Image (spheres, rainbow, N blue to C red):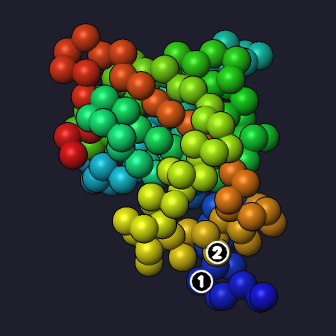
Amino acid sequence: MAASTGARLGAKMLRTRWLVRAPIRLYRAGFGFLFGSRMLMLSHTGRRSGATRFVVLEVVDRPTPDQLIIVSGFGADAQWYRNIQADPHVRVWIGTRRGIPAIATPMSSGESAAALARYAEKHPVAWNRLRATIEEATRAPVDSLPMVHLQSLSDRDGHLASG
């Protein structure tokens, strides 16, 4: 099935490095709240360089206030995903919350499938658009993408998001 014009455009945007990295500046300047609670910025440590790296990702699910689930839209080869496998200690910026320490744990394929099903049920329009765009960008079925569980280590109130 041929991809729609929207999916092709979205895929091109996802492959445009400067565009997908642009929100990082806003998060770092304290304007992450502009993206609401469906997006987050994750800081992680480069597995070879040891440098702090940043990526902005979509939140797939919130099992509890101190847990989030995110997806690696570019699969297991995404640099951030490979980095969290080497060092799972991360920091999360979401909404008005900034730099919350957390542990990132890759999920099993069964856990990922269940989380994706919940996302599709809660956000059917976004799911249809996102699925088509990611599949066009990666040339892989979105169902095969790895997901990551984030658990807050915050000693404040433990919450990664307000709702």
Q: In the picture, residue 161 is in which quadrant?
A: top left
Horizontal side of residue 43 vs 144, given as left or right: left
Q: Which residue is drawn at the image coordinates 30% and 49% (left, top)?
A: 37
- Residue 158 vertical placement versus 54 (above, below): above
Residue 41 in percent (x, y) is at 44, 38
Mark 2 nearby-residue class (10 Å; few <14, some 14–19, many ≥20): many
Residue 77 in percent (x, y) is at 78, 40
- Residue 76 vertical placement versus 133 (above, below): above
Foreground tag (2 vs 1): 2
Going from N to C along the chain, the mark reached first, 2 or 1, is: 1
Mark 2 residue type: Ala
Q: Which residue is mark 2?
A: 132
Camera-side residue of 112 and 140 = 112
Q: Is residue 31 visible?
A: no
Task: Identify the disc placed on residue 6.
Answer: 1
Q: Which residue is drawn at the image coordinates 71% and 35% (left, top)?
A: 79
- Residue 4 vertical placement versus 140 (above, below): below
